[in-house]
C-alpha cells in the first residue's frame, strides 16, 4: 500500500489554441496576456476569451489558456455539451483523433475546428519523484476516495508523469460539484499496488 496527499484543481470549460488560430481570432501577431498562473508550471489563464458555437447553441466568455499549443483543443464538462449540441468523448488531453469539431469566434475572426472537442479524463499530474514515492507509473489508473457527506469514489483516474508537472488532481466542474469539491482541497489517496490498473494499449 502507498499513500499520498494531492491537491484538487477544478477545471472550467476552456480552450487551447495554436499561434495560427490565435492570430486568426485576435489579430496578426497577437500574444496571450496572462491573467493568472495555473497549478502546473508555465501554464496560465489568459485575459482572452472566445465564443463557442455548436449545432444547438453557443457559449460566450470561454477562457483561453496559455501558452499556445501545437494543436487547438476545446475542453468541456458534460453539461456544456448538451447546450452546444456536441458529443465529445472522454479523452486525455491531446488525444484528438476522432473527436468532433466546433466553431470558435474571437473579436476579429472565427475558425472552424474539424476536430478537437473533448471531455477531459480525470487525472493526476505528478513528477517522476512523486511517482517513484507512490509506486506509480505514467499511464496507470487508480481509484481516489472522497470523504464527506457527498463523498464517493473516482474510478479510472489517469496518472500523468513528467518532470514538467507539479502534484495536482484535475477534475471538471461536473465532477467537482457532484462531490462538493473545491479547488485547493486536499485528498488522501491510498494506492493498492497489487490492484492498480494499467491503461489499455
Image: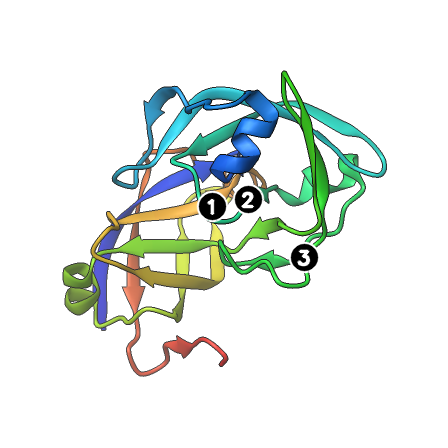
Distance between the Cα atoms at labels 2 and 1? 20 Å
Q: Position of residue 11 (x, y in %)?
A: 47, 37
Q: Which residue is mark 3?
A: 99
Earlier in the chain: of badge 1 and badge 3, it is 3
Element marked by disc 1: strand
Task: Residue at 71%, 49% (x, y): give it.
Answer: 114
Side of 40 relative to 120 (left or right): left
Q: Which residue is mark 2?
A: 72
Earlier in the chain: of badge 2 and badge 1, it is 2
Q: Nearer the viewer, mark 3 or mark 2?
A: 2
- Using the rendered view, name the quadrant where residue 181 is placed: top left
Q: Residues within 10 Å of mark 3 (few under 14, many from 20)?
A: some
Q: Nearer the viewer, mark 1 or mark 3?
A: 3
Distance between the Cα atoms at labels 1 and 3? 20 Å
Q: How is the image coloured?
A: rainbow
Q: Which mark is residue 152?
A: none
Element marked by disc 2: loop
Q: Which mark is residue 171?
A: 1
Distance between the Cα atoms at labels 3 and 2? 12 Å
Compare residues 25 and 182 and report the one nearer the observer: 25
**Is residue 157 at all visible to an observer of this figure?**
yes
- Using the rendered view, name the quadrant where residue 103 is placed: top right
**Is residue 14 at all visible to an observer of this figure?**
no
Task: Residue at 47%, 48% (x, y): give it.
Answer: 151
Q: Position of residue 162 (x, y in %)?
A: 26, 59
Compare residues 33 and 156 and report the one nearer the observer: 33
Amino acid at each position: 500500500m502507498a499513500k499520498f496527499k494531492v491537491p484538487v484543481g477544478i477545471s472550467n470549460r476552456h480552450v487551447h489554441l495554436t499561434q495560427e488560430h490565435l492570430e486568426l481570432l485576435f489579430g496578426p501577431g497577437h500574444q496571450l496576456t496572462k491573467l493568472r498562473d495555473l497549478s502546473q508550471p508555465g501554464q496560465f489563464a489568459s485575459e482572452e476569451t472566445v465564443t463557442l458555437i455548436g449545432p444547438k447553441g453557443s457559449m460566450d466568455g470561454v477562457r483561453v489558456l496559455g501558452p499556445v499549443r501545437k494543436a487547438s483543443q476545446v475542453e468541456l464538462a458534460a453539461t456544456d455539451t448538451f447546450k452546444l449540441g456536441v458529443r465529445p468523448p472522454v479523452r486525455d488531453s491531446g488525444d484528438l483523433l476522432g473527436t468532433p469539431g466546433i466553431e470558435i469566434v474571437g473579436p476579429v475572426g472565427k475558425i472552424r475546428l474539424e476536430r478537437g472537442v473533448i471531455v477531459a479524463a480525470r487525472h493526476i499530474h505528478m513528477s517522476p519523484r512523486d511517482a517513484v514515492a507512490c509506486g506509480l507509473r505514467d499511464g496507470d489508473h487508480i481509484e481516489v476516495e472522497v470523504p464527506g457527506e457527498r463523498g464517493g469514489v473516482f474510478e479510472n483516474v489517469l496518472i500523468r508523469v513528467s518532470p514538467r508537472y507539479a502534484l495536482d488532481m484535475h477534475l471538471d466542474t461536473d465532477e467537482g460539484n457532484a462531490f462538493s469539491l473545491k479547488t485547493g482541497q486536499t485528498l488522501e489517496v491510498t494506492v493498492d499496488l497489487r490492484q492498480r490498473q494499467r491503461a489499455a494499449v
